[in-house]
Image (tube, rainbow, N blue to C red):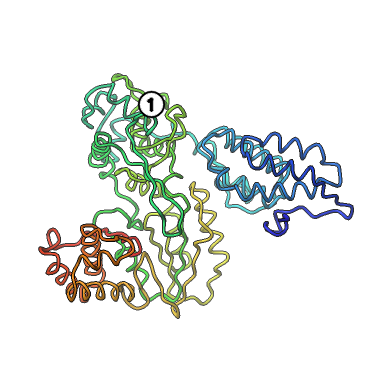
Amino acid sequence: MSASQSAPAWLLLPLPANADADAILIATIEQYATSLPQEFKKLHDALDEVRALASYEPAVNRSNTLVWEKLETLLTAPEGTARIALIRYAREHMPERACARVLRRLAKDADMNVRRTVAKAIRKAKIQEVAIPAKKDGDWDPSGWLLPDEVSKVTRHKTGKRAQERSGVPALTKLAELRKLLGIKSTNQLGFFLLASDHKGGPYTTHKIPKRDGSDRQICAPKKQLKWVQKQILKHILSKVPPHPAAHGFVSGRSTVSNATPHVGAELVVKFDLKDFFPTVHYFRVMGLFASLGYPVGNCMFGTDDGANQIAPVLARLCCYTPDPKQWGSAALPQGAPTSPAISNLVCRRLDARLQGLAETNHGTYTRYADDLTFSFPKAEGMNLGRFRWWVDQVCQQEGFVVNQEKFRVIRDSQRQVVTGIVVNDAVRAPRELRREIRAILHNCETKDLESQAKRHPRFRGNVPAFSQYLRGIAAYLNMVQPEHGAALLRRVNELLGGPIEGDTPSQDQGKAGDA
């Protein structure tokens, strides 16, 4: 397969009239590309040797295509050295547009050395792209992708008891006080929790579950003792700090319904999705969050000494996961920890404030449910969607998040407008197919039996308890979204399965209908 058949045109260099596709060189390139990122140096050297020859452009186009196919894997490589090798390759061998994508994506990397390499590459490459200035009166150029020096310092936050009181969180100055608050029995137990990994019997377990798109989602679940500690952090610290009003996911008293309701009756709904939401919130961002609440960072290293004052680093480590405990700065929020949703909401407070301001400037409304960003506008006329999309993308990048461009959606009122699984064209409604599905299942269960329907359902294959829980969850969800229709279905489910759902009141945060 040729490079031109599998790569976007802007990824390829134009071929000179005397271009020579050296089959041996291209075979060598393909061999090195199969072992990236380990063989980046050999790949770079092979291309560098022919840079002045007619065989360079065909070889580099093939190389760029193969690198681009692995780009997501390379951008998220656990070793910072691998990402630095990608940056150097992009700067030397990729066209400006492709190089810009790599640099922009890694500009807010957790690894300080990666960020420094990006900054140097931006200065040397002289990329001609427009970006929001990183600070007031700054230039509208790629320097806006970088963290300003004053923002990147976690020690900039005011810490101490007064700052903690202003934040409404418990006053803590030493690790002994933190251990007592969280119920950690000893410094040895704290040290075990600070491994933050499933490596060699660590405090986490990991497994994968399928996503709706067919890929896998890794769940990093804390073991019983660490989970209890994380619940204490949630109860005593995180729950004391309110998220932004635009945040609706995992917030008490808010739900998918409260997230969808502000968008009812809009002529235009615009939806964005943040890529790798929890993994993007890395250890240093979590430490910065706790430091912003007034907790001291000490030397920015976590430890177990009761007399030490590294409260923010220890709290951050207790809430993060890493596959390799030796790489202490590589941890990030795990999917599966009870603290992750609250931390992500608090980390997103400035993002939410900026996007809400952007929406209001354009006479629109903004809400966020976890990684789903929704904007709506009462009038579509005069709305410059291209410019608006650019601004959202730029703001998200500056706040350390990545927009998943493949999930961008524009929905006009002539179409079915769905926000977090709820139809909002003229009122808050559950999707018609969901209501029909539950009615059909209930009818079959009532006329036949529950066991036969559990066997027929492709998700449950005879697992009656799981199937029963599914029916309860869907009925409770429909009752929350549309009580006028859901109440009757809920009663039928209760009659079928026996007994009401706990308290007869559905949860305020059932999740999206598609996840049920």
Where's residue 206, x and y in %?
37, 41
Which residue in the rendered view is the most extreme toward the left?
499
Q: Is residue 49 visible?
A: yes
Q: Nearer the viewer, residue 49 or 239?
A: 49
What's under tag 1, amino acid-wise?
Phe
Residue 248 place in picture, x, y as percent = 32, 57
Residue at the outermost bottom position: 414
Along the line of sight, which residue is nearer the eye, 487 or 355? 487
Residue marked by disc 1: 302
- Residue 448 location (% of width, % of height): 19, 73
Residue drawn 16% across the image and 62% down it: 505
Can residue 169 be seen in this snapshot?
no
In the image, residue 135 sits, relative to residue 474, either above or below, namely above
Identify the element where label 1 is drawn.
loop
Quarter of the picture containing the C terminus is bottom left
Q: For the point 36% across and 46% down, which residue is it?
A: 346
Q: Nearer the viewer, residue 335 or 32?
A: 32
- Residue drawn at 64 percent across, 40 percent down: 87
Where does residue 215 sit, x and y in percent of width and height? 46, 54
